[in-house]
Amino acid sequence: MHTTTTTTTTTTTTTTTTTTTTTTTSSATTTTTTTTTTTTTTTTTTTTTTTTTTTTTSFSQNQ
């Protein structure tokens, strides 16, 4: 009798980067002109790793 075991491992890594930039400009006109600019940048990185393992065992008997 022979036993054959096959193991297959698959690893998948996905990285997603999202960058959001928001610019707000405010201006007021009086005797003096004032302009205010605010810039906000947000970066989010998400990493997802998926591992799949498949094991197959086969039996064979030789006479």
Image (cartoon, rainbow, N blue to C red):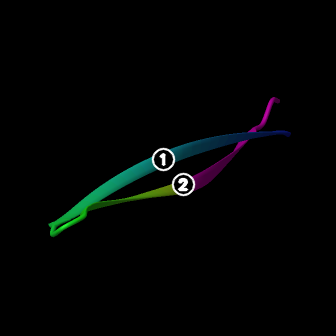
The residue carrying mark 1 is 17
What residue lies at 48% left-to-right and 47% top-to-bottom?
17
Query: Looking at numbered disc 2 in the image, what kind of residue is underneath it?
Result: Thr
| Percent of width and height locating residue 8 | 69, 39
Viewer-proximal residue among 49 and 5: 49
For the residue pair 25 and 6, the one nearer the viewer reads as: 25
Instruction: Give whichever of 14, 21 is nearer the camera.
Output: 21
How far from the left and from the top, in percent, is residue 54? 64, 48
- Whether 14 is drawn above or below 49: the answer is above
Q: Quadrant of residue 60?
A: top right
Q: Nearer the viewer, residue 16 or 13?
A: 16
Give the residue number, with chain letter if any, for mark 2: 45
Is 58 colored magenta in this rendering? yes
Q: Secondary structure at mark 2?
A: strand
Q: Amino acid at mark 1?
A: Thr
Magenta span: predominant SS is strand
Range of the magenta residues? Answer: 47-63
The crowding category of the residue bearing disc 1, from other C-alpha atoms within 10 Å (few below 14, some 14 to 19, many at least 20), is: few
- Cβ–Cβ below 8 Å for labels 2 and 1? yes
